[in-house]
Image: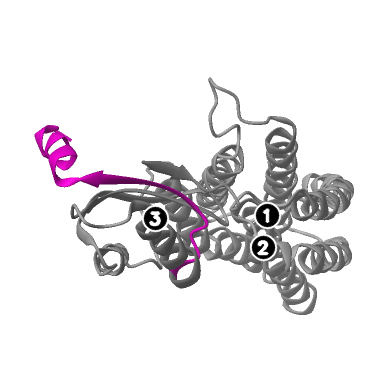
Amino acid sequence: MGHDHSHGLRPQSASGKHLRLLAIALTIGVVFMLVEFSVAFGTGSLALLSDATHMLTDVVGVGMALSAILLARNSRPTYTRTFGYYRAEVIAALANAVLLFGVAGYVLYEALTRLGEPPEVPGLPVLIVGLVGLVANVISFLLLRRGAQESLNVRGAYLEVFADMIGSIGVLISAAITITTGWYYADMVVGVAIGLWVLPRTYVLAKRSLRILFQHSPEELDVERVAAELAAVDGVTDVHDLHVWTLTSGMEVASAHITTCGSSHPDEILRAAQRILAEQFHIDHATLQIESSDTARRCAELAW
Protein backbone atom coordinates (compact mmCIF):
# COMPACT_ATOMS: atom_id res chain seq x y z
CA MET A 1 0.00 0.00 0.00
CA GLY A 2 1.45 3.37 -0.93
CA HIS A 3 0.55 6.98 -0.48
CA ASP A 4 1.77 10.14 -2.20
CA HIS A 5 1.02 13.28 -0.23
CA SER A 6 1.79 16.36 -2.37
CA HIS A 7 1.01 19.35 -0.18
CA GLY A 8 4.69 20.30 0.00
CA LEU A 9 4.67 22.01 -3.40
CA ARG A 10 5.54 25.70 -3.18
CA PRO A 11 2.63 28.10 -3.59
CA GLN A 12 2.66 30.13 -6.80
CA SER A 13 2.30 33.40 -4.84
CA ALA A 14 5.73 32.90 -3.26
CA SER A 15 7.48 32.38 -6.57
CA GLY A 16 5.54 35.34 -8.03
CA LYS A 17 6.84 37.58 -5.26
CA HIS A 18 10.39 36.35 -5.83
CA LEU A 19 9.95 37.00 -9.54
CA ARG A 20 9.06 40.67 -9.02
CA LEU A 21 11.90 41.27 -6.57
CA LEU A 22 14.46 39.63 -8.85
CA ALA A 23 13.23 41.65 -11.86
CA ILE A 24 13.73 44.93 -9.98
CA ALA A 25 17.15 43.84 -8.69
CA LEU A 26 18.17 42.81 -12.23
CA THR A 27 17.25 46.22 -13.67
CA ILE A 28 19.21 48.06 -10.98
CA GLY A 29 22.20 45.78 -11.44
CA VAL A 30 22.40 46.17 -15.23
CA VAL A 31 22.32 49.98 -15.09
CA PHE A 32 25.02 50.39 -12.45
CA MET A 33 27.17 47.57 -13.81
CA LEU A 34 27.51 49.45 -17.11
CA VAL A 35 28.45 52.61 -15.22
CA GLU A 36 31.08 50.82 -13.12
CA PHE A 37 32.67 49.06 -16.09
CA SER A 38 32.91 52.30 -18.06
CA VAL A 39 34.66 54.15 -15.25
CA ALA A 40 36.84 51.14 -14.31
CA PHE A 41 38.31 50.87 -17.80
CA GLY A 42 38.60 54.64 -18.07
CA THR A 43 40.54 55.01 -14.81
CA GLY A 44 42.37 51.65 -14.67
CA SER A 45 41.02 50.97 -11.17
CA LEU A 46 41.38 47.29 -10.19
CA ALA A 47 39.16 47.81 -7.15
CA LEU A 48 36.41 49.26 -9.31
CA LEU A 49 36.94 46.58 -11.96
CA SER A 50 36.65 43.90 -9.27
CA ASP A 51 33.45 45.46 -7.98
CA ALA A 52 32.05 45.85 -11.51
CA THR A 53 32.84 42.19 -12.24
CA HIS A 54 31.07 41.19 -9.04
CA MET A 55 28.13 43.26 -10.22
CA LEU A 56 28.28 41.37 -13.53
CA THR A 57 27.91 38.12 -11.60
CA ASP A 58 24.99 39.76 -9.77
CA VAL A 59 23.35 40.49 -13.10
CA VAL A 60 24.04 37.03 -14.52
CA GLY A 61 23.12 35.35 -11.24
CA VAL A 62 19.87 37.27 -10.80
CA GLY A 63 19.06 36.66 -14.46
CA MET A 64 19.55 32.90 -14.02
CA ALA A 65 17.52 32.94 -10.82
CA LEU A 66 14.75 34.75 -12.68
CA SER A 67 14.88 32.26 -15.54
CA ALA A 68 14.86 29.32 -13.11
CA ILE A 69 11.67 30.53 -11.41
CA LEU A 70 9.96 31.12 -14.77
CA LEU A 71 11.02 27.65 -15.91
CA ALA A 72 9.78 26.01 -12.73
CA ARG A 73 6.46 27.90 -12.79
CA ASN A 74 5.67 27.17 -16.42
CA SER A 75 6.77 23.53 -16.51
CA ARG A 76 4.39 21.24 -14.71
CA PRO A 77 5.40 17.65 -13.88
CA THR A 78 4.71 15.13 -16.65
CA TYR A 79 5.10 11.37 -17.03
CA THR A 80 8.59 11.93 -18.46
CA ARG A 81 9.55 14.76 -16.08
CA THR A 82 7.87 13.58 -12.89
CA PHE A 83 9.28 16.43 -10.78
CA GLY A 84 9.08 19.09 -13.51
CA TYR A 85 11.95 21.60 -13.50
CA TYR A 86 12.08 22.41 -9.80
CA ARG A 87 15.80 21.57 -9.71
CA ALA A 88 16.50 24.39 -12.21
CA GLU A 89 16.87 26.93 -9.43
CA VAL A 90 19.40 24.75 -7.61
CA ILE A 91 21.47 24.46 -10.78
CA ALA A 92 21.26 28.26 -11.14
CA ALA A 93 22.54 28.71 -7.58
CA LEU A 94 25.47 26.37 -8.29
CA ALA A 95 26.27 28.26 -11.49
CA ASN A 96 26.32 31.50 -9.46
CA ALA A 97 28.91 29.99 -7.15
CA VAL A 98 31.08 28.90 -10.08
CA LEU A 99 30.92 32.44 -11.49
CA LEU A 100 32.06 33.94 -8.21
CA PHE A 101 35.01 31.54 -7.99
CA GLY A 102 35.98 32.61 -11.51
CA VAL A 103 35.80 36.30 -10.61
CA ALA A 104 38.09 35.83 -7.62
CA GLY A 105 40.67 34.06 -9.80
CA TYR A 106 40.55 36.79 -12.45
CA VAL A 107 41.09 39.58 -9.92
CA LEU A 108 44.07 37.76 -8.39
CA TYR A 109 45.59 37.36 -11.86
CA GLU A 110 45.15 41.06 -12.62
CA ALA A 111 46.74 42.01 -9.30
CA LEU A 112 49.82 39.85 -9.99
CA THR A 113 50.35 41.55 -13.36
CA ARG A 114 50.39 44.94 -11.61
CA LEU A 115 52.95 44.11 -8.92
CA GLY A 116 55.89 46.48 -8.97
CA GLU A 117 54.20 49.06 -11.16
CA PRO A 118 50.69 49.97 -10.02
CA PRO A 119 48.87 52.36 -12.37
CA GLU A 120 48.03 55.88 -11.23
CA VAL A 121 44.34 55.59 -10.52
CA PRO A 122 42.42 58.88 -10.16
CA GLY A 123 40.62 58.69 -6.84
CA LEU A 124 37.69 61.08 -7.32
CA PRO A 125 35.88 59.29 -10.21
CA VAL A 126 36.35 55.98 -8.40
CA LEU A 127 34.96 57.49 -5.20
CA ILE A 128 31.85 58.83 -6.93
CA VAL A 129 31.09 55.60 -8.81
CA GLY A 130 31.79 53.51 -5.71
CA LEU A 131 29.24 55.57 -3.81
CA VAL A 132 26.64 55.16 -6.55
CA GLY A 133 27.34 51.41 -6.69
CA LEU A 134 26.92 51.15 -2.93
CA VAL A 135 23.49 52.80 -3.10
CA ALA A 136 22.43 50.42 -5.88
CA ASN A 137 23.59 47.37 -3.94
CA VAL A 138 21.89 48.47 -0.73
CA ILE A 139 18.59 48.79 -2.59
CA SER A 140 18.94 45.33 -4.16
CA PHE A 141 20.10 43.85 -0.84
CA LEU A 142 16.99 45.09 0.96
CA LEU A 143 14.75 43.85 -1.85
CA LEU A 144 16.14 40.29 -1.78
CA ARG A 145 16.73 39.85 1.96
CA ARG A 146 13.38 38.27 2.84
CA GLY A 147 13.23 36.08 -0.27
CA ALA A 148 16.70 34.71 0.56
CA GLN A 149 15.23 33.02 3.65
CA GLU A 150 12.63 31.20 1.53
CA SER A 151 14.54 30.15 -1.60
CA LEU A 152 18.07 28.86 -2.22
CA ASN A 153 17.86 30.35 -5.67
CA VAL A 154 17.09 33.86 -4.36
CA ARG A 155 19.72 33.31 -1.67
CA GLY A 156 22.36 32.84 -4.37
CA ALA A 157 21.49 36.21 -5.90
CA TYR A 158 21.25 37.76 -2.43
CA LEU A 159 24.75 36.61 -1.47
CA GLU A 160 26.19 38.06 -4.64
CA VAL A 161 24.52 41.41 -3.99
CA PHE A 162 25.73 41.31 -0.38
CA ALA A 163 29.29 40.58 -1.48
CA ASP A 164 29.14 43.38 -4.03
CA MET A 165 27.83 45.78 -1.38
CA ILE A 166 30.89 45.07 0.74
CA GLY A 167 32.96 45.45 -2.41
CA SER A 168 31.53 48.93 -3.00
CA ILE A 169 32.59 49.89 0.53
CA GLY A 170 36.08 48.63 -0.31
CA VAL A 171 36.11 50.78 -3.46
CA LEU A 172 35.24 53.83 -1.37
CA ILE A 173 38.07 53.05 1.05
CA SER A 174 40.64 52.59 -1.72
CA ALA A 175 39.55 55.81 -3.41
CA ALA A 176 39.77 57.73 -0.12
CA ILE A 177 43.30 56.41 0.53
CA THR A 178 44.40 57.27 -3.02
CA ILE A 179 43.03 60.82 -2.75
CA THR A 180 44.48 61.54 0.69
CA THR A 181 47.85 59.75 0.49
CA GLY A 182 48.56 59.10 -3.20
CA TRP A 183 49.35 55.43 -2.38
CA TYR A 184 48.27 53.68 -5.60
CA TYR A 185 48.78 50.21 -4.17
CA ALA A 186 45.59 50.78 -2.15
CA ASP A 187 43.49 50.16 -5.25
CA MET A 188 45.22 46.85 -5.97
CA VAL A 189 45.12 45.65 -2.35
CA VAL A 190 41.41 46.41 -2.02
CA GLY A 191 40.71 44.76 -5.37
CA VAL A 192 42.34 41.52 -4.19
CA ALA A 193 40.59 41.75 -0.81
CA ILE A 194 37.22 42.05 -2.52
CA GLY A 195 37.97 38.99 -4.64
CA LEU A 196 39.03 36.88 -1.64
CA TRP A 197 36.32 38.07 0.74
CA VAL A 198 33.50 36.40 -1.14
CA LEU A 199 35.12 32.96 -1.42
CA PRO A 200 33.95 31.43 1.91
CA ARG A 201 30.35 32.45 1.22
CA THR A 202 30.61 31.10 -2.29
CA TYR A 203 31.87 27.79 -0.92
CA VAL A 204 28.84 27.50 1.38
CA LEU A 205 26.45 28.21 -1.48
CA ALA A 206 28.16 25.63 -3.73
CA LYS A 207 28.16 23.05 -0.93
CA ARG A 208 24.43 23.46 -0.28
CA SER A 209 23.62 23.27 -3.98
CA LEU A 210 25.68 20.11 -4.48
CA ARG A 211 24.11 18.53 -1.41
CA ILE A 212 20.69 18.91 -3.02
CA LEU A 213 21.86 17.73 -6.45
CA PHE A 214 23.45 14.63 -4.91
CA GLN A 215 20.15 14.02 -3.07
CA HIS A 216 21.74 13.95 0.37
CA SER A 217 19.41 14.32 3.32
CA PRO A 218 18.71 17.89 4.52
CA GLU A 219 21.63 19.04 6.64
CA GLU A 220 19.51 19.94 9.67
CA LEU A 221 17.51 16.70 9.62
CA ASP A 222 18.37 13.66 11.79
CA VAL A 223 17.33 10.76 9.53
CA GLU A 224 18.09 8.18 12.25
CA ARG A 225 15.55 9.91 14.48
CA VAL A 226 13.01 9.86 11.63
CA ALA A 227 13.48 6.09 11.32
CA ALA A 228 13.20 5.62 15.09
CA GLU A 229 9.98 7.64 15.33
CA LEU A 230 8.39 5.69 12.48
CA ALA A 231 9.52 2.38 13.98
CA ALA A 232 7.89 3.35 17.30
CA VAL A 233 4.39 3.44 15.77
CA ASP A 234 2.17 0.67 17.16
CA GLY A 235 2.13 -2.34 14.86
CA VAL A 236 5.38 -1.44 13.04
CA THR A 237 8.11 -4.08 13.17
CA ASP A 238 10.67 -2.53 10.82
CA VAL A 239 11.42 0.59 8.76
CA HIS A 240 13.76 0.26 5.77
CA ASP A 241 14.57 1.86 2.42
CA LEU A 242 14.11 5.24 4.12
CA HIS A 243 15.16 8.11 1.88
CA VAL A 244 14.85 11.82 2.62
CA TRP A 245 16.05 14.46 0.19
CA THR A 246 15.43 18.04 -0.91
CA LEU A 247 13.84 18.57 -4.29
CA THR A 248 14.56 22.30 -4.19
CA SER A 249 14.69 24.86 -1.39
CA GLY A 250 11.72 24.47 0.94
CA MET A 251 10.57 21.19 -0.64
CA GLU A 252 11.66 18.13 1.36
CA VAL A 253 10.60 14.71 0.10
CA ALA A 254 10.65 11.28 1.79
CA SER A 255 9.99 7.68 0.91
CA ALA A 256 10.07 4.55 3.09
CA HIS A 257 8.97 0.94 3.43
CA ILE A 258 7.18 0.20 6.71
CA THR A 259 6.83 -3.45 7.76
CA THR A 260 3.88 -4.32 9.99
CA CYS A 261 2.77 -7.34 11.98
CA GLY A 262 -0.13 -9.46 10.81
CA SER A 263 -2.73 -8.07 13.25
CA SER A 264 -2.04 -4.41 12.49
CA HIS A 265 -4.30 -1.98 10.59
CA PRO A 266 -2.37 -0.55 7.59
CA ASP A 267 -4.52 2.58 7.19
CA GLU A 268 -4.04 3.59 10.82
CA ILE A 269 -0.27 3.02 10.60
CA LEU A 270 -0.11 5.04 7.39
CA ARG A 271 -1.96 7.98 8.94
CA ALA A 272 0.26 7.86 12.04
CA ALA A 273 3.44 7.83 9.94
CA GLN A 274 2.21 10.74 7.82
CA ARG A 275 1.39 12.72 10.95
CA ILE A 276 4.86 12.12 12.43
CA LEU A 277 6.62 13.22 9.25
CA ALA A 278 4.48 16.34 8.85
CA GLU A 279 4.31 17.51 12.47
CA GLN A 280 7.74 16.55 13.81
CA PHE A 281 9.91 16.86 10.71
CA HIS A 282 7.90 19.20 8.41
CA ILE A 283 7.90 16.68 5.56
CA ASP A 284 4.50 16.91 3.87
CA HIS A 285 5.41 15.13 0.63
CA ALA A 286 6.05 11.47 1.48
CA THR A 287 5.54 8.17 -0.30
CA LEU A 288 5.13 5.35 2.23
CA GLN A 289 4.76 1.66 1.43
CA ILE A 290 3.07 -0.48 4.07
CA GLU A 291 4.09 -4.13 3.70
CA SER A 292 3.91 -7.44 5.54
CA SER A 293 6.96 -9.35 6.73
CA ASP A 294 6.63 -11.70 3.74
CA THR A 295 6.73 -8.81 1.27
CA ALA A 296 9.65 -7.22 3.11
CA ARG A 297 11.87 -10.20 2.27
CA ARG A 298 11.93 -9.00 -1.33
CA CYS A 299 13.57 -5.73 -0.23
CA ALA A 300 16.34 -7.63 1.55
CA GLU A 301 17.19 -9.41 -1.69
CA LEU A 302 17.87 -6.20 -3.60
CA ALA A 303 21.50 -5.24 -4.17
CA TRP A 304 20.94 -1.51 -3.44
Would you name the residue on which mark 3 appears?
Answer: 270
Q: Is residue 31 above or below residue 279?
A: above
Q: Position of residue 101 (x, y in %)?
A: 51, 48
Element assignment for label 1: helix
Q: Position of residue 147 (x, y in %)?
A: 72, 62
Within 10 Å of disc 3 (Cα), the crowding (few <14, some 14-19, many 20+) is: some
Asked whether residue 157 is drawn in magenta, I would say no
Residue at 78% over, 44% down: 41
Question: Hey, which quadrant is residue 78 in on the image?
Answer: top right
Q: Is residue 160 above or below residue 34?
A: below
- Does any portion of residue 109 appear in the rendered image? no
- In the displayed orientation, state which residue is furthest to the front: 263
Label 1 to label 3: alpha-carbon separation: 36 Å
Q: Earlier in the sequence, mark 1 or mark 2?
A: 2
Q: Amino acid at mark 1?
A: Val
Q: Is residue 53 left or right of residue 189?
A: right
Asked whether residue 291 is drawn in magenta, I would say yes
- In the displayed orientation, state which residue is furthest to the top: 80
Q: Are marks 1 and 3 in contact (CB under 8 Å)?
A: no
Q: Where are the magenta residues, as a range?
A: 281-304
The label shown at residue 148 is: 2
Relative depth, front residue between 167 and 214: 214
Relative depth, front residue between 219 and 251: 251
Question: Hey, which quadrant is residue 120 in on the image?
Answer: bottom right
Q: Are marks 1 and 2 in contact (CB under 8 Å)?
A: yes
The label shown at residue 154 is: 1
Within 10 Å of disc 2 (Cα), the crowding (few <14, some 14-19, many 20+) is: some
Residue at 77% over, 53% down: 18
Quadrant (top left, top right, bottom left, bottom right) of the C terminus: top left
Element assignment for label 2: helix
Quadrant (top left, top right, bottom left, bottom right) of the N terminus: top left
Q: Amino acid at mark 3?
A: Leu
